[in-house]
Amino acid sequence: MTLPPLVLGLESSCDDTAAALVRGRDVLSSVVMGQNALHSDFGGVVPEIAARAHAERLDTAVKQALSEADVRLTQVDAIAVTSGPGLIGGVLSGVMVAKGLSIGLRKPLIGVNHLAGHALTPRLTDDLAYPYLMLLVSGGHCQFLIARGPQDFTRLGGTIDDAPGEAFDKTARLLGLAQPGGPSVEAEARKGDEKRFRFPRPLLDRAGCDMSFSGLKTALLRQRDALVADQGGLTEQDRADLCAGFQAAVRDVLSEKTRRALALYLEEAPESPAIAIAGGVAANQSIRAALQTLCDDQAVRFTAPPLRLCTDNAAMIAYAGSELFAAGVTHDMSLSARPRWPLDQKAAPLLGSGKKGAKA
C-alpha cells in the first residue's frame, strides 16, 4: 500500500511561527511558537517585530517538528507554505525558508492560501465531503464560503468592516483586558449578565449574509464611557457584563447570518449537508453552542476543529498543501508573498481594492 506524501507545512502570516508534518489526515507533529510576550506592551501585533521573530524562529520550529514526528528532513515529500494573505514581512519570511528547503532538498514547493488552510481544516479533522458550508471567522477575516474543492470556493457573504476577532481584540483593549482579546473577553463574559447591556445587532435588518462589527465596538465604547462618567470608573461586574453583552451580540449576528447562508447552501441539495466553523473565533464556546443548536434544528451536520487547530497553525497548511499536491499543483521559485489573496476570485471585493488587490 502506497503511503500518502509526507508534507512539511510552514505558517508565518501573523504572530504565530509554526511548522508541522502531515501525512494524509495524520498530523505527525504540530509546533506553534506564539509571540504574545513580544507584542504585549503595544496592544496589538507590531508587523516589524513579528517578521523579525519569524525569521529567527522558523528553522527552530522546523527542527522541533521533525524531532516530534521522528522523521528526517530528507524524508519529506513536499514543502507547503503560507504565501498569503497576511502581514507581508511574516509571509515573506516563510516563503523564503520554504524556497530554500525546496531547492536544498529538491522537493516540490506548494504555496497555500492561509484562508484555504482554515477552510480545509474540517477535511483534515473530520474527513468532511465536498461541498460543505464554511464559516471562516478569525482576527482578520469573516466570511461564508461553499467549499467545493481545494481551490474552488464560493463566497456567500462576509464582514464589510472589522472581523469578529478584531472586534474582540479592540473590546479587550477598551476594557483593559489582556491580548489576544478573544479568550480574555470570553472568560469575563462567563461571569457577566448578557442582558444588562443590549448592544446592536448590525445588519440584521439587511437581507443577505454580509456582516458588520465596527459599530458594535463603538457602542461598547460609548457604554463604557457613560459608566465611567456616571460613577467614576468601572466595577469588575460592569466589565463582565459589558463583555457578556458584546459576546452575545456577536453570537446572535453570526447565528442569524449563518442561518441565511445555510438556506442558500441547502438550495444546492448537497448529498451530505454539513457546516463547519474554523478560525480563531471558532474557539469561542458560546458561538459554537449557538451554531450547534442551529444545525441540530436544521438536521445538518456541524463540525468544529479541535481548539488547537482553530487558531493559526502549520498542520492546516500542510494538509491544504497535500490536497493541492494531489491535484497536481506545485510552484516554482517565482512564488511570491501576497498580503491580499481572496479565496473567491470572482466575487466583488467586500472591503475594497487597491494596488495590492482585493482585501477580501
Image (tube, grey):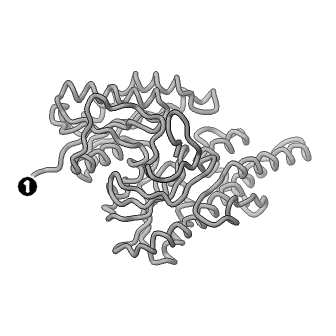
Q: Mark 1: give few (<14), some (14-19) or many (20+) Cα within 10 Å.
A: few
Q: Image point 40% across, 76% down: which residue?
A: 269
Residue at label 1? 1
Residue 221 as seen in the image, left or right of residue 4 = right
Residue 18 located left or right of residue 168: left
The residue lying toward the viewer, choosing from 185 and 24, is: 24
Residue at the spot 63% in from the left edge and 42% down from the top edge: 169
Residue 346, percent from left and from top: 45, 52
Q: Quadrant of the N terminus?
A: bottom left
Of all residues, the one furthest to the right in this rendering is 230
Label 1 SS? loop
How many numbered circles does the render carry?
1
Residue 221's x, y, as percent? Answer: 77, 45
Image quadrant where residue 28 sits: top left
In this view, 335 is above or below 236: above
Where residue 145 appears, as percent x and y from the top left, is 46, 58
Along the viewing direction, whichever of 239 and 342 lies nearer the viewer: 342
What percent of the width, then of the height, locates residue 260? 56, 69
Question: Residue at the location (73% across, 60% down)?
Answer: 193
Q: Nearer the viewer, residue 161 or 235?
A: 161
Nearest the viewer among 317 and 155 is 155
Q: Amino acid at mark 1?
A: Met
Tell me what residue is drawn at x 63 percent, y 27 percent: 41
Given the current orientation, which residue lies at the most extreme left position?
Answer: 1
Residue 281 in view? no
Looking at the picture, does residue 17 appear above or below residue 182?
above
Residue 354 in view = yes
